[in-house]
Amino acid sequence: MRAFLPLILLFAIVPMTIGAPAPPLKIAGTTSVVYKTVGETTLFLYVFNPKEHQQSDERPAVVFFFGGGWNGGTPTQFEHHCRHLASRGMVAMVADYRVKNRQGTTPKECVMDGKSAIRWVRSNATNLGIDPNRIAAGGGSAGGHVAAATGTVVGLEQPGEDIRISSQPNALLLFNPVYDNSPSGYGYSRVKDVYPQISPMHNIKKGTPPTIVFLGTKDSLIPVATAREYKQRMETVGRRCDLHLYEGQPHGFFNYGKQKYYLDTVDKMDTFLVSLNYLKAKELGTCD
């Protein structure tokens, strides 16, 4: 009988933890806030505030979405991007969202969560001390798809939310983004016949936010031709799309730790945000 005691105790413990909401991650220097609850899933935003930030401020803001093929990933992917932007005066956030490996979801739910995050930030602008008309969305790979979809896709809103509050960001920061879900693009097997509804490439319009894109020319998932086609479609409807190609670089070349390209892409992202009046131009002779 004694040999079975550990097993009995294990079964006694497991039911107490099944379905329990996951606690927020511990990311130094952040405040975690719940932006959405779906069933047993609680989704958090992790907020990096500038020094001496006040609730009465009206600062620009940004929300980043992690990559991982809509299957997994971690909000910490863009932690250092947020630290940089917070040091420059923005309220910067990384968002968790539902993925296949943790919640059994599809790209559709990923986009719905992305839209919920932008809507929550805008509806809480006064409490966050931000300008509701200067909210950027950013992300890499599948997270780039989530960000791009918040800026382009009509519909896919979470039922029950106040759709009078827009879920569309005012600018997009896209790092090797998945933005063509057609049969010739990436992720078609996951979205299939709904690709015209969920593919950013196929939902570009006059109201699409100004966009900056970073892509390596050796990316095995996102062809350079796709990026150029996206830029052309944006410019056809009179929208800005800055495309930066990095010769010989693969997917994920921009991540923190790959310092040469991390620093270069962050610098160009910074310059883009200065041009939109989200950041002040750096003074000559200063450094981060």
Image (spheres, grey):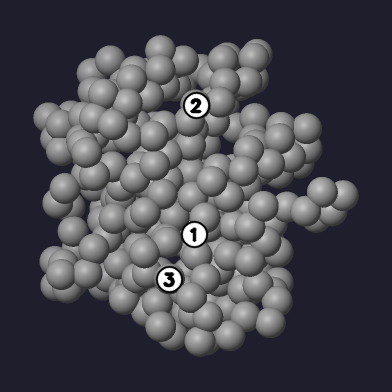
Identify the residue position indicated by label 3 in the image. Answer: 131
Q: Is residue 144 above or below residue 219?
A: below
Marks 1 and 2 sit apart, C-alpha to C-alpha, by: 20 Å
What is the three-letter code of the residue carrying label 3? Answer: Asp
| Residue 63 visible, this angle | no
Quadrant of the drawing holding the C terminus: bottom right
Q: Foreground residue, 144 or 123?
A: 123
Question: What residue is at 42 percent from the left and 39 percent from the top?
Answer: 211
The amino acid type found where label 2 is placed reads Leu
Going from N to C along the chain, the mark reached first, 1 or 2, is: 1
Q: Which residue bears the numbered disc 2?
A: 243
**Image quarter of residue 279:** bottom right
Identify the residue at image location x=71%, y=35%.
264
**Real-space Cα separation, disc 1 to disc 3, in angstroms:** 11 Å
Q: Secondary structure at mark 3?
A: strand
Label 2: which secondary element: strand
Label 1 amino acid?
Val
Q: Position of residue 155 (x, y in %)?
A: 14, 51
Residue 183 visible in this rendered orientation of the protein: yes
Which residue in the structure is indicated by mark 1? 62
In depth, the one of 136 and 34 nearer the eye is: 136
Q: Residue 241: percent from the left, percent from the top?
A: 41, 32
- Taking the spot 47% from the left edge, 80% from the top edge, the residue there is 128
Q: Position of residue 50 (x, y in %)?
A: 65, 72
Point 30% across, 67% down: residue: 119
